[in-house]
Image (tube, rainbow, N blue to C red):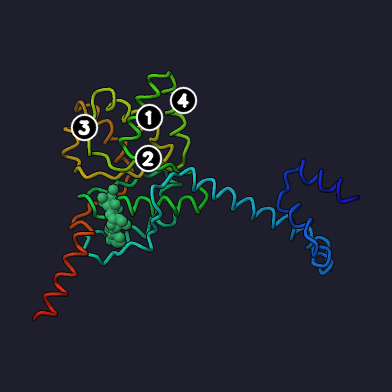
Amino acid sequence: MDWDTLNTDLKRLKLRRIRELLSQEAIGEALSSFEDPIEMVGYLIGEEVSARDETQREKRLKGARFPVEKTLDEFDFGAGVSICEEAIRSLENMEFLANRENVVFLGPPGIGKTHLAIGLGTIAVETGYSVRFITAGRLIDALYASLADGTFKRELKRLAGFDLLVIDELGFLSLDRTASDHFFQVINAAYERQSVILTTNRPFQEWAALFDDAITVSAILDRLLHRAHIFNMKGESYRLRGHATATSEEVKHLA
Ligand code: ADP
Ligand code: MG
């Protein structure tokens, strides 16, 4: 078989990595070093598979739309925040995703809720799950907009299509009746079908003030908390904590 035909066939079969390898000058030599032809084919196929895995991973990472890069390893559990490292670490194996369980981070601003949510979401991407990060505000805006142009159902279905939905910053604004209902529909669609990681600065007792009516709140909490890992984070803002440490160091120096 001449190279042009092979090249065309590889193109048709979308074997991009193999095509790339075979078009390299030195490839003949490299392939002739394989004694076993099966091993040689295995090498080429293996290269194709890892290249595709990498492409998929990059696609998933882009699709997740994390606002910044954050990893769990960068999180300082000793920084004075009341959160159990072991409990977070126990989520790293992504079993909570396989079991469609939710994770809720509650706590004041700057304490690391978004950081942990992105950290877990990133592991999910690496593990092969599809993830979508969205702030509660944008989620509500998007659903309002979809209502206007008649794509609400499609939008809801699209959101429910991810293995993991990360909803960040619930609680910065109160939701009117329509928005409360939309939020309920998202949580209801997710219920036992996908996992949700939610971050909020409002304790559950205050959710009644957040949503339009008590029935919607209890319906949301019912589904969200049915199988959930809840982290009630207490402490100071990480940035403020940084200042506090610097100050006490300075005080030590002065003493
Ligand atoms: P929240 O979502 O709770 O308001 P963030 O997760 O946005 O807080 O944290 C604010 C900033 O401080 C981020 O840059 C985050 O990476 C950092 N941060 C917060 N807590 C920690 C921590 N314990 N270790 C390392 N960085 C932290
Ligand atoms: Mg945040």
Which of marks 1 and 3 precedes in the sequence?
1
Circles 1, 2 touching at the beta carbon (< 8 Å): yes
User: Going 46% across and 41% down the picture, which residue do you hit?
Assistant: 163
> Is the residue marked 4 within 8 Å of ligand 2, measured from its CB?
no
Which of marks 4 and 1 precedes in the sequence?
1
Which of marks 3 and 2 precedes in the sequence?
2
Q: Is residue 213 left or right of residue 195?
A: left
Viewer-closest of 155 and 6: 6
> Is the residue marked 3 within 8 Å of ligand 2, measured from its CB?
no
Amino acid on which the number 2 mark rests in the picture: Ile
Quadrant position of residue 227: top left
* Alpha-carbon span between mark 1 and mark 2: 10 Å
User: Going 28% across and 26% down the picture, which residue do you hit?
Assistant: 179
Residue 154 - label: 4
Amino acid on which the number 4 mark rests in the picture: Arg
Label 4 crowd (10 A; few <14 / some 14-19 / many >=20): few
Measuring from the top left, give residue 156's x and y in whole percent. Answer: 42, 28
* Alpha-carbon span between mark 2 and mark 4: 17 Å
Residue at image mark 3: 174
